[in-house]
Each structure stands twice: as structure tokens, then as C-alpha cells.
Image (cartoon, rainbow, N blue to C red):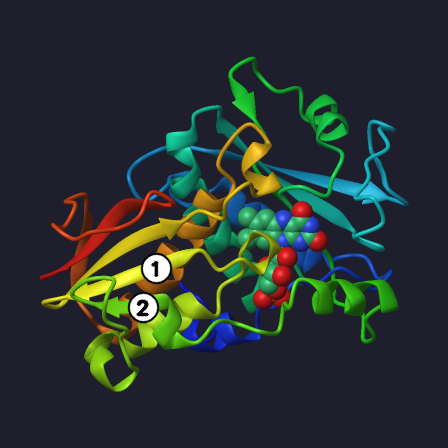
């Protein structure tokens, strides 16, 4: 699929939206979203796993079936939800994160507000609405609509609490050769912008758990799990969604800049502590 704007601009524009205008989503935008969701290429993860995404319109927090759904007050006046569905298998989480973030970027490009929700929504009422198969679960959803001109006080306070506008420094997230040496922007070479776009990504509770080691033009992607993080106790490791988001930003930026490479699983011979998980390497071609 093609974005209208540069992917760099879209990633910079995206921010979590929790307060929406009461204005319904235009018919034209609804059609574009439904068209996106009807293209099976948009429902297949980067390593071939297929997912489902349901479009659930809401009117005053009730679905067309009359089911009341809620977000514990986190989201105001959404016009619909996009509900992600995956087979309940932790291994799928990274691919789901990648695929759902691509959808979020598509919506951002259309001018539609989104907010990843992995925890603060009534999972059971969405499960009833969707009629999940036995082996399926809802890893995350997003409300959609047009962002309200003004944020509510609640939303501003929440952003302050999770330090949403504080993204960690480049040198803190990225390393060279091993975890003993921080990577400066100047040392990142062609990967400066792909890594910068990783840094700007959304993450559960803004924990920013991605760590990347650049070694001989290849980038090793690790997840530094937050100890005792409640999000990882929702029946799956929620922070793996964050890693999928990071990989999505990285790969789309490489594509736009013409940087060639592919994802492989080939764990490098470097030391890392037990809170870390190695997942994928971007191998340059
Ligand atoms: C996997 C995932 C789960 C999230 N779950 C929630 C949630 O349950 N409730 C919420 O209000 N925000 C949630 N967020 C949004 C984050 O809090 C937000 O991305 C982060 O604070 C950074 O802010 P930004 O998205 O505006 O850059 C989630 C984000 C991700 C990626």
C-alpha cells in the first residue's frame, strides 16, 4: 500500500488521541478504512501470520448490537473501534504489533486519530461483540475518529503521568557492537532515520522497551521487558507488541529511504541480561 505523505512525516504526526470530536467519520474515510481492511495483504504480518481486524461503530459507547463497551473513561467520543484479533499464541504478538501499527499509520495519514489500547478497555464486552473463536484473543484495539481540538484535563494528566512526550535519548536505546557501547546519532550512518523513527513510536505505558545493537551494518532488535509490568500479565507479553511497532517503523523508513535488508532470526554472540529477549535482526543486503 502507498501512503499519501512521507512515512517520516506520518510517524512524527502520530500521537495518541483520547478525546475525539463528536463529528462522525466521513463516508469517504469509512470507505477507505473498510477498503484497507478488505485487502488481505494488510492483514498478514511480516512473517506470514494472518490476523483479523473488525470495524465496530459505536454510538454513545454502544455498539450496533446494543453492547455497552468501555474504556474506564480513558477515551471520549470515539466514533468506532478497530479491534485486533489473533490466535492466542504469544509468538504472534510481534507480527500483530507490526501489522496493527501499519494500520495506525494509514489512519494517521488519512487524518484520523488513534490510540493503541492494550489494557484500559473492557475486554469481555468486546469479546462478546466480536464472537471470538475459542483459540482467539484481542491483543489490542484502537478508537477512531477526528481528534478534538482541545485535550481534556484527564488526557493531559495521563500524558504527564506516563511521560508520553518524553522519549528516551537515542544513545540510551541504541548500541554499537554490544550493550557496552552506546550508539551516537553520528555513528548510526544510514540507520540514523530508521532508528529515530523507532524512537518516536508508541509503546505500552510509554516504556519504550526496544533496544537495537548495530553491528557491521546489521541491526539486532531486542526487547527489554519491564520487570513486573502489569501489561505483560494480560495473558500475553504486551511489550512484544511494542517491538513489532518498532520493526514496522524501522522497515517502512528503510523502504522509503531505499535501504535494502531483510529480517532474519540469528542471535548475535553478545552478552545481555535476563530481562532482555533477542527477536530479529535486520540484515543488510
Ligand atoms: C501496546 C500498547 C498498549 C497501549 N495501551 C494503552 C492503554 O491501555 N490505555 C491508554 O490510554 N494508552 C495505551 N497506550 C498508549 C501509550 O500510553 C502511548 O503510546 C505512550 O504514552 C506514548 O504516547 P504517544 O502514543 O502519544 O507517543 C498503549 C500503547 C501501546 C503501544
Can you tell me whether the CB of the residue at mark 1 lies under 8 Å from the nearest atom of ligand 1?
no
Q: Position of residue 188 (x, y in %)?
A: 23, 78
On residue 219, the disc is none
Q: Position of residue 230 (x, y in %)?
A: 61, 40
Residue 234, percent across and down? 60, 32
Marks 1 and 2 sit apart, C-alpha to C-alpha, by 6 Å
User: Tag 2's secondary structure?
Assistant: strand
User: Residue 215: which quarter of the image?
Assistant: bottom left
Which residue appears at 81% of the width and 71% of the height? 151
Asked if labels 2 and 1 touch by Cβ distance under 8 angstroms, the answer is yes
Residue extending farthest to the bottom is: 186
Residue at image point 16% right, 53% down? 270
Q: Residue furthest top?
A: 134
How many discs appear? 2
Q: Quadrant of the C terminus?
A: bottom left
- Marks 1 and 2, the one that precedes in the sequence: 2
Q: Is residue 2 left or right of residue 25?
A: left
Across and down, in percent, residue 73 comes to 85, 49
For label 1, the residue is: 211
Can the viewer see residue 143 in this picture?
Answer: no
Q: Residue at x 28, y 73 (%)?
A: 182
Question: Dividing the picture into quarters, in which one does residue 211 lie?
Answer: bottom left
Frontmost residue, 171 versus 12: 171
Residue that mark 2 sits on: 174
Residue 103, above or below 110: above
Residue 46 vs residue 159, the one in the foreground: 159
Q: Quadrant of ligand 1?
A: bottom right
**Which residue is at 79% across, 52% downward?**
74
Amino acid at each position: 500500500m502507498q501512503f499519501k505523505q512521507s512515512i517520516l512525516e506520518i510517524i512524527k504526526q502520530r500521537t495518541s488521541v483520547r478525546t475525539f470530536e463528536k463529528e462522525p467519520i466521513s463516508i469517504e474515510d469509512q470507505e477507505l478504512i473498510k477498503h484497507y481492511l478488505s485487502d488481505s495483504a494488510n492483514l498478514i504480518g511480516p512473517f506470514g501470520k494472518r490476523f483479523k481486524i473488525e470495524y465496530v461503530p459505536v454510538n454513545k459507547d454502544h455498539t450496533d448490537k446494543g453492547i455497552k463497551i468501555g474504556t474506564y473513561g480513558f477515551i471520549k467520543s470515539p466514533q468506532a473501534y478497530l479491534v485486533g484479533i489473533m490466535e492466542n499464541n504469544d509468538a504472534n504478538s510481534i507480527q500483530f504489533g507490526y501489522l496493527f501499527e501499519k494500520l495506525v499509520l494509514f489512519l494517521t495519514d488519512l487524518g484520523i486519530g488513534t490510540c493503541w489500547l492494550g489494557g484500559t478497555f473492557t475486554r469481555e464486552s468486546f469479546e462478546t461483540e466480536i464472537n471470538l473463536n475459542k483459540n482467539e484473543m484481542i491483543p489490542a484495539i484502537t478508537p477512531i475518529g477526528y481528534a478534538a481540538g482541545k485535550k481534556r484535563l484527564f488526557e493531559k494528566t495521563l500524558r504527564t503521568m506516563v511521560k508520553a512526550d518524553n522519549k528516551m535519548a537515542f544513545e540510551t536505546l541504541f548500541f554499537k557492537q554490544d550493550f557496552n557501547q552506546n550508539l551516537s546519532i553520528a555513528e548510526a550512518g544510514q540507520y540514523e532515520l530508521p532508528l529515530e523513527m523507532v524512537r518516536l513510536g508508541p509503546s505500552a505505558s510509554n516504556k519504550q522497551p526496544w533496544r537495537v545493537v548495530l553491528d557491521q551494518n546489521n541491526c539486532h532488535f531486542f526487547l527489554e521487558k519491564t520487570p513486573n509490568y502489569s501489561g505483560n500479565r494480560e495473558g500475553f507479553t504486551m511489550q512484544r507488541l511494542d517491538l513489532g511497532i518498532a520493526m514496522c517503523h524501522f522497515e517502512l523508513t528503510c523502504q522509503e529511504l531505499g535501504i535494502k535488508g531483510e529480517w532474519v532470526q540469528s542471535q548475535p554472540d553478545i552478552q545481555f541480561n535476563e530481562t532482555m529477549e533477542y527477536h530479529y535482526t535486520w540484515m543488510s543486503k
